[in-house]
Amino acid sequence: MKHEKKDDKLVAAVLADWRTAPLDPRLRATLGFLEKLTLAPADVRPADLAPLRAAGVSDDGIEDAIHACVLFNIYDRLADSMNWYLPGPDGYAASGRNLMRRGYRL
């Protein structure tokens, strides 16, 4: 239980502001890149990868992050445009636990 409370605090800090949350520098760099990829994809350039590499993110890690970002963006846009039912926080928490256990691979 103690571990879950720590995780809850971290999640709350990230949701409040990922820039100031106590994150690993690799994750912080990745989130900054993914924010730009989501909000201004036409402005993304090869130079935008430099902060990720400087923080120690591997090319495979960058590729995995891009794939996850693209899939979530597609899901979000389809859900908005088609008015899909979306689960509440408990449903997303259960999905997150499943993903942490088995990953994104089928």
Image (tube, rainbow, N blue to C red):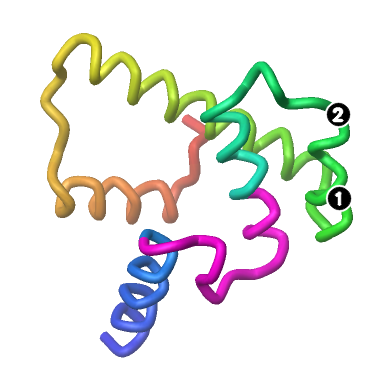
Which label sits on residue 46? 2
Inspect the image, locate mark 1, and give the three-letter code of the amino acid beneath it.
Arg
Residue 17 on the magenta segment: yes
Disc 2 to disc 1, C-alpha distance: 11 Å
Mark positioned earlier in the residue sequence (2 or 1): 2
Q: Secondary structure under badge 2?
A: helix
The residue tagged 1 is 53
Residue furthest top as drawn? 82
Location of the N terminus (image quadrant): bottom left
Along the horizontal axis of the image, is 105 left or right of 12?
A: right
| Pick the front one: 20 or 97 | 20
Please determine whether, in this image, residue 24 is positioned above or below residue 93.
Answer: below
Residue at 55% in and 76% down: 22
| Pick the front one: 44 or 67 | 44
Are the two marked residues, 2 and 1, in contact with CB atoms closer than 8 angstroms? no
The range drawn in magenta is 16-30
Mark 1 nearby-residue class (10 Å; few <14, some 14–19, many ≥20): some
Dividing the picture into quadrants, the one containing residue 64 is top right
Q: Secondary structure under badge 1?
A: helix
Residue furthest bottom as drawn? 2
Please determine whether, in this image, residue 9 is positioned above or below residue 105.
Answer: below
| Pick the front one: 16 or 83 | 16
Along the horizontal axis of the image, is 75 left or right of 91?
A: right
Residue at 82% in and 39% down: 49
The picture places residue 19, in percent across and down from the top left corner, at 56, 63
Residue at 33% in and 55% down: 97
Dividing the picture into quadrants, the one containing residue 27 is bottom right
